[in-house]
């Protein structure tokens, strides 16, 4: 049964709501801990471990298939995240520069939020594949990836700008971030109300619940898929340049020029991503979805792979020359965000393609687990590598990692059905 309600009502907001907790946990936490006085090495290590729930989520993804409906799971997880972020706001250290024990409870609540968010992802992605046919999945994959990334830019832009303005107003960094996290909780509360009203009821019961699907059956059928090892290599290495660099982008913007950074304020850092960044990302994602729907995944793979990897060069340029003109920083971020919005479409569409068939909800969850693993492992070491090499040397290494993207892309096109994604 397909949804009668237009996907434009729920696809953008569903993936915006999916992205908000993910990026608060995995990206905004970096900015917050940096402002609260944590070192680059510590914040990269501890926040990279926050990816773990996305790595292991296939262990409970069959439960989302067989218990209630995916619509129920979406709304329930969003409601629990509202509560969790509210508690997180009250647990932050009261002063900057506190020792690590002061961060224990915030980290615990971040891990709980990560578990809830990962479960929400399983339900949302499964719901997307059930509610839309193959062509509309291809057409809307650019929209969903765009709004997912907009949630990232919203977090790094609007949320961080708000935190920066509150830091200036109160002169109290912990208080500013406490209020900011309460506002994020309120935003998610609005998402709960909206989705309870607009998500179509496309399931009477989970379509995979006719028999009790076991975790072993879901895993076993996934690893028996044709071309599984090539698919895993692709999922682990396609985003390697981003995986290594993402934890260090915010510290790079915030660290002083004497440390090799750009010396931006919290507000400036947020504005860079929240203005031209969001516009460029939106345009890139929409064009990527239209392009893939027109030519199919196979033909779109190469241009999207290059678009994803090569714009990382803008950070090497900024690290080497440390431009003082903020307009140059805006232009560099715009190039990077447009390329990412366009290129990431191929990665998401390939995971949908590889998940087709029996257990597609569970198999897509397994694919996204490998996606999370591809981000967690390089990110865990990113802070230590950056401190050892400096920012310029670090971004040189990021550019070397682009070779991995090129290599895995070269191996894949012949294994993809030329008609997939086309009308």
Image (tube, rainbow, N blue to C red):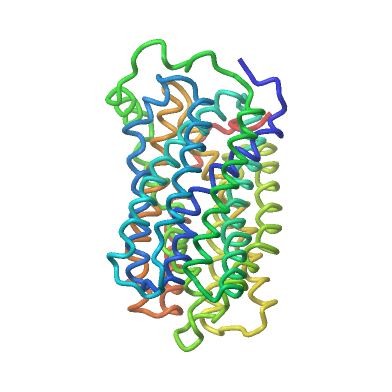
Q: Position of residue 296 (x, y in %)?
A: 62, 37
Q: Position of residue 32 (x, y in %)?
A: 46, 65
Task: Locate the N terminus by quadrant.
Answer: top right
**201 relative to 8, above or below:** above
Q: Position of residue 373 (x, y in %)?
A: 36, 49
- Report the front residue among 226 and 151: 151
The quarter of the displayed image where residue 171 is located: bottom right
Q: Is residue 107 left or right of residue 296?
A: left
Residue under the image location 61 percent in, 62 percent down: 157
- Report the front residue among 75 and 259: 75
Give the number of callouts: 0
**413 relative to 9, above or below:** below
Q: Position of residue 387 (x, y in %)?
A: 35, 77
Q: Is residue 85 visible?
A: yes
Residue under the image location 40 percent in, 19 percent down: 66
Q: Is residue 354 left or right of residue 137?
A: left
Task: Locate the C terminus by quadrant.
Answer: top right
- Report the front residue among 305 and 221: 221
The quarter of the displayed image where residue 38 is located: bottom left
Residue under the image location 30 percent in, 59 percent down: 104
Quick one: which residue is furthest to the top in this view? 210
Quick one: which residue is furthest to the bottom in this view? 258
């Amino acid at each position: 049964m397909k949804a009668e309600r237009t996907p434009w009502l729920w696809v953008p907001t569903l993936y915006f709501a999916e992205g908000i907790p993910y990026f608060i946990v995995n990206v905004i936490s970096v900015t917050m801990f940096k402002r609260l006085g944590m070192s680059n090495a510590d914040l990269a290590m501890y926040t990279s471990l926050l990816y773990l729930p996305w790595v292991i989520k296939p262990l409970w993804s069959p439960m989302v298939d067989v218990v209630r409906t995916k619509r129920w799971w979406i709304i329930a997880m969003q409601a629990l995240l509202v509560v969790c972020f509210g508690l997180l706001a009250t647990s932050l250290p009261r002063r900057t520069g506190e020792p690590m024990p002061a961060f224990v409870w915030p980290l615990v609540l971040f891990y709980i939020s990560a578990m809830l968010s990962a479960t929400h992802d399983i339900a949302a992605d499964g719901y997307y594949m059930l509610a839309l046919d193959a062509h509309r999945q291809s057409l809307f994959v650019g929209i969903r990836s765009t709004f997912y990334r907009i949630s990232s830019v919203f977090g790094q832009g609007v949320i961080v700008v708000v935190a920066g303005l509150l830091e200036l107003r109160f002169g109290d960094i912990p208080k500013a971030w406490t209020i900011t996290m309460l506002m994020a909780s309120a935003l998610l509360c609005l998402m709960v109300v909206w989705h309870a009203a607009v998500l179509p009821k496309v399931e009477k019961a989970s379509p995979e619940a006719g028999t009790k699907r076991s975790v072993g059956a879901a895993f076993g059928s996934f690893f028996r898929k044709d071309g599984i090892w090539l698919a895993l290599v692709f999922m682990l290495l396609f985003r390697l340049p981003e995986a290594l660099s993402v934890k260090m982008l915010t510290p790079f913007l915030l660290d002083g020029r004497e440390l090799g950074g750009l010396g931006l304020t919290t507000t400036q850092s947020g504005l860079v991503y929240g203005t031209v960044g969001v516009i460029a990302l939106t345009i890139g994602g929409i064009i990527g979805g239209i392009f893939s729907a027109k030519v199919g995944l196979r033909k779109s793979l190469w241009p999207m792979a290059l678009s994803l990897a090569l714009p990382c060069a803008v950070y090497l340029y900024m690290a080497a020359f440390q431009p003082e003109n903020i307009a140059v920083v805006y232009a560099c971020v715009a190039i990077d965000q447009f390329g990412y919005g366009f290129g990431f479409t191929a990665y998401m569409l390939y995971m949908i393609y590889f998940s087709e068939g029996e257990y597609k909800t569970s198999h897509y969850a397994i694919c996204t687990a490998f996606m999370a693993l591809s981000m967690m492992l390089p990110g865990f070491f990113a802070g230590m590598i950056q401190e050892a090499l400096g920012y310029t040397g670090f971004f040189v290494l990021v550019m070397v990692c682009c070779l991995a993207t090129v290599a895995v892309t070269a191996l894949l096109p012949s294994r993809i059905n030329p008609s997939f994604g086309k009308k």
